[in-house]
Image (cartoon, helix red, strand yellow):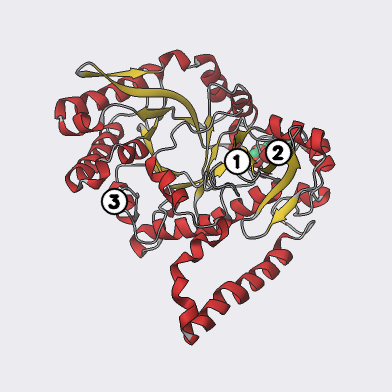
């Protein structure tokens, strides 16, 4: 089993409990449509005409062999909806000759986890396809009345030197702020200490900065419901960014230390206090260099389905960038793309299953020889199988097609992408980057 992002917390599970079915979520805002003729017309236009036109456009645009942005694939005809399990087995390890040529020219942030060594290999092999590499190494924790930055033992300096010989990708290890938020945010001494620990580690280890994850934890602790604490939380991130920007990187004196901040998708148009919204984005934008936007894990064993329906991705991006002020910040967003999949139990009365890696996906294909299906609404491939104990499963795992349309969406919106995580994908996914 692939270990997932180990940080599923209250806010992200909230929305699963609302019970809305996967493909209808973005539609739920017009439930009253049925009662009014005018609304019915709107409803028809929205949910019948527009999807029909989109499907048509989609067919034309993404028909096999016609995707001009990926010349090599045009010849191979592999980016398509009607894929065959055998073709995936035959082709998945083939990569284009030039491993440093970039097809997706917006910023690309790639996560690497210490528990999956394939990610380290992929980062070395395709260094030039990435602008930022983020190994998931650090936790900033409370210890007694103080703080401690844990994770140095994960740091692999040989690997970093190799990356730097290969190309210019920045190395920004991820730091999770585990420390008790109330104390941290209320005490100036602790806040200063946290910032000092992070900056000293960057200097000593010659990192180009960090990726910080704290919002989901603060939400889980209920911190963000209190307006005063929420404000302190934002101020802390600004303070950290400001301090990092005043330190030039030890490798390259012209470059200051970079801060990328991890944010989750809002779940409804009406933002909840724990949602990170457009105003937050604007308020942090001077001090934060990028935002890693976790548009994945839409479904769960409790509510099986596609990992990140395309409509939902659009919807969340629209909420985050909707107003004109935030729109200008699109270039700071790294839209999340999952390179892992899910194998869900879908038998009546039972639930279970979870994340799978590329390797596990390939062995399922080999064993069950399934028929892959394209789910138009979500823009994802999936297949069904019955295991040895006669339990039904549904497997959603990315495909060249599903990744291509997400890259195309990101390109249209002018945003970068972030991949969780590069060790869990299939080799030929990197041809698209
Ligand atoms: C590979 O791609 C890089 C980056 O686009 C380019 O500079 C280089 O010339 C290419 N190498 C070959 C052998 O085509």
The residue at the far front in this view is 349
Q: Which residue is mark 3?
A: 273
Residue 250 appears in the figure: no
Q: Circles 2 and 1: CB distance less than 8 Å?
A: yes
* Mark 3 to mark 1 CA distance (whole Å): 33 Å
- Mark 3 or mark 1: whose residue is earlier in sequence: 3
Q: Is residue 405 above or below residue 99?
A: below
- Mark 2 or mark 3: whose residue is earlier in sequence: 3
* Mark 2 to mark 3 CA distance (whole Å): 40 Å
- Mark 2 or mark 1: whose residue is earlier in sequence: 1
Say if disc 3 is inside 8 Å of ligand 1.
Answer: no
Looking at the rendering, in which quadrant would you find the C terminus?
top right
Ligand 1 position by quadrant: top right
Disc 1 is placed on an element classified as loop
Q: Which residue is mark 2?
A: 391
Q: Is residue 58 above or below residue 354?
A: below
**10 Å crowding of disc 2: few (<14), some (14-19), many (20+):** few
| Foreground: disc 3 or disc 1 | 1
Residue 56 appears in the figure: yes
Q: Is residue 354 above or below residue 30?
A: above
Disc 3 is placed on an element classified as loop
């Amino acid at each position: 089993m692939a270990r997932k992002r180990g940080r599923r917390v209250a806010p992200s599970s909230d929305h699963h409990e609302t019970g809305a079915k996967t493909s209808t979520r973005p539609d739920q805002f017009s439930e009253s449509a049925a009662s009014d003729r005018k609304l019915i017309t709107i409803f028809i236009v929205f949910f019948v005409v527009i999807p029909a036109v989109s499907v048509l456009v989609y067919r034309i645009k993404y028909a096999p062999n016609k995707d001009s942005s990926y010349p090599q694939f045009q010849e191979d005809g592999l980016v398509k909806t009607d894929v065959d399990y055998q073709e995936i087995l035959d082709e998945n390890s083939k990569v284009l000759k030039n491993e440093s040529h970039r097809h997706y020219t917006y910023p690309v942030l790639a996560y690497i986890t210490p528990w999956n060594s394939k990610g380290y290999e992929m980062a070395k092999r395709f260094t030039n396809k990435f602008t930022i590499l983020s190994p998931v190494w650090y936790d900033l924790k409370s210890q007694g009345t103080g703080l401690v930055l844990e994770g140095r033992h994960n740091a692999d300096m040989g690997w970093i030197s190799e990356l730097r010989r290969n190309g210019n990708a920045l190395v920004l290890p991820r730091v999770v702020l585990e420390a008790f938020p109330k104390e941290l945010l209320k005490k100036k001494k602790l806040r200063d200490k946290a910032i000092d620990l992070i900056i000293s580690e960057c200097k000593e280890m010659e990192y180009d900065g960090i990726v910080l994850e704290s919002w989901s934890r603060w939400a889980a602790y209920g911190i963000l419901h209190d307006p005063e604490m929420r404000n302190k939380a934002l101020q802390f991130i600004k303070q950290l960014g400001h301090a990092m920007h005043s330190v030039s990187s030890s490798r390259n004196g012209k470059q200051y230390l970079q801060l990328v901040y991890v944010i989750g998708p809002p779940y409804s148009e009406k933002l909840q206090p724990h949602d990170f919204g457009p105003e937050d984005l604007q308020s942090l934008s001077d001090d934060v260099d990028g935002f890693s936007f976790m548009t994945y894990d839409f479904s769960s064993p409790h509510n099986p389905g596609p990992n990140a329906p395309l409509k939902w991705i659009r919807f969340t991006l629209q909420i985050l960038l909707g107003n004109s002020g935030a729109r200008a910040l699109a270039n700071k967003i790294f839209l999340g793309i999952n390179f892992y999949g899910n194998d869900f139990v879908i038998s009546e009365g039972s639930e279970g299953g979870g994340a799978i890696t590329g390797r596990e996906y390939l062995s399922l294909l080999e064993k069950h020889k399934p028929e892959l299906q394209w789910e138009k609404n979500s823009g994802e491939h999936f297949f069904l199988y019955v295991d040895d104990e006669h339990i039904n499963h549904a497997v959603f795992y990315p495909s060249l097609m599903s990744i291509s349309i997400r890259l195309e969406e990101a390109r249209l919106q002018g945003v970068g992408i972030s991949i969780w995580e590069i060790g869990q994908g299939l080799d030929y996914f990197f041809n698209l980057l």
